[in-house]
């Protein structure tokens, strides 16, 4: 049985990934979280194969304990984009230096593989044109800059042979949080689903003409599982993009959410947005993950399914209030 440490295990992606791997009988999980035990979701309490640890990743001794007896680390903990913008110094410590210290602890404890979930935004902003792993990164936001620095520590360790290293550059994850305590409702897909359930109207803060690549969270989970299971010889340099099947404008996403709202909620919300500027130029986005496909990965997720799941969660929360 493979022993896996997941940091940020009760976060937005971490929660879904932890529940996904927790259902696979060939994995024993150690979940590192900042939540107190009273706030642990039920799925992380009720399995003999899941151990939860309240951990401060700034504590060197705690990192050694977390990595002891572990075969693979999946690292998601770090500072989100809102905090990174407000406090870049904290983001540098938590995301970049925190990754470096966790990586060193993993090396000392003999961990075999280290998987770091990074972001497509290391390529710059706004994302546009054809982007693959050969595209030169130009991060401009503190969130992206600190993720790029963390990537370099991980990939360098892999290149030096200290550990098997994988970096996954995720596009925009779309899907329901594992539980309602996860505060990621500022993400555009989640925010629009919340608006549909609570307000019955979808209000965009822009014209919605910008394209984004949306990947179902179910495929994020499958992608991580895929790289966990890949033979070392198939990892190459360890760097992979992970995105969706096609890009959508934000307005197209809103339209999709409106259609699914009629099915899940019984209402068809209007989409309201500012008019597009007459001189606004938008570029299409083609976020490529062929490199990961060539290792045998195949996406199976559905944006519609993820929207339905998010709408249902929003409705459930609304009915409980």
Image (spheres, grey):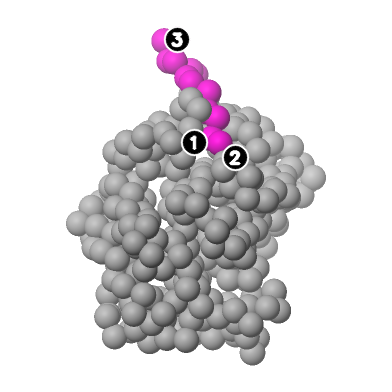
Around disc 2, counting alpha carbons within 10 Å, would you say few (fewer than 14), some (14 to 19), or many (20 or more)? some
Q: Give the labeled residue for mark 2.
A: 290
Identify the residue at horizontal 53%, vertical 56% (top origin).
235
Give the percent coordinates (x, y) of residue 155.
37, 56
> Which secondary structure class fits the magenta region best?
loop
Q: Is residue 290 above or below residue 7?
A: above
Q: Is residue 192 visible?
A: no
Q: Give the labeled residue for mark 1.
A: 132
Q: Is residue 277 magenta?
A: yes
**The quarter of the displayed image where residue 137 is located:** top left
Which of the numbered marks, if any, corresponds to residue 278?
3
Q: Is residue 207 left or right of residue 264?
A: left
Identify the residue at horizontal 48%, vertical 81% (top origin).
70
Around disc 1, counting alpha carbons within 10 Å, would you say few (fewer than 14), some (14 to 19), or many (20 or more)? some
- Labels 1 and 2: the sequence-earlier one: 1
Q: What element carries label 3?
A: loop
- Marks 1 and 3, how far apart in space? 31 Å
Q: Is mark 2 on a helix, strand or loop?
A: helix
Give the percent coordinates (x, y) of residue 42.
62, 80
Q: What element carries label 1?
A: loop
Question: Is there a contact, CB below 8 Å, between mark 1 and mark 2?
Answer: yes
């Amino acid at each position: 049985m493979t022993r896996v440490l997941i940091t940020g295990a009760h976060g937005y992606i971490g929660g879904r990934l932890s529940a996904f791997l927790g259902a696979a009988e060939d994995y024993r999980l150690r979940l590192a979280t900042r939540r107190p035990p009273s706030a642990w979701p039920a799925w992380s309490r009720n399995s003999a194969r899941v151990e939860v640890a309240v951990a401060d990743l700034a504590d060197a001794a705690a990192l050694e304990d977390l990595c002891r007896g572990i075969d693979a680390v999946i690292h998601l903990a770090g500072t989100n984009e809102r905090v990174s913008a407000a406090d870049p110094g904290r983001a540098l410590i938590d995301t970049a230096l925190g990754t470096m210290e966790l990586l060193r602890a993993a090396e000392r404890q003999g961990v075999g593989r280290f998987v770091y979930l990074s972001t497509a935004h290391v390529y710059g902003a706004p994302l546009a044109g054809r982007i693959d792993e050969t595209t030169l990164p130009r991060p401009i936001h503190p969130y992206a800059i600190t993720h790029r620095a963390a990537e370099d520590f991980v990939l360098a360790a892999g290149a030096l042979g200290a550990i098997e290293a994988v970096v996954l550059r995720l596009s925009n994850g779309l899907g329901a949080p594992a539980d309602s305590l996860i505060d990621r409702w500022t993400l555009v897909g989640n925010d629009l689903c919340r608006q549909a359930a609570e307000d019955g109207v979808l209000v965009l803060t822009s014209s919605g003409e910008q394209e984004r690549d949306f990947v179902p969270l179910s495929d994020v989970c499958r992608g991580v599982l895929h790289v966990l299971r890949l033979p070392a010889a198939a990892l190459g340099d360890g760097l992979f993009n992970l995105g969706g099947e096609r890009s959508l404008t934000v307005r197209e996403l809103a339209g999709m959410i409106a259609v699914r709202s009629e099915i899940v909620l019984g209402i068809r919300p209007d989409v309201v947005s500012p008019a597009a500027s007459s001189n606004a130029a938008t570029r299409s986005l083609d976020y490529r993950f062929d490199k990961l496909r060539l290792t045998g990965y195949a996406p199976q997720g559905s944006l519609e399914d993820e929207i339905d799941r998010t709408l249902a969660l929003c409705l459930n929360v609304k009915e409980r209030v």
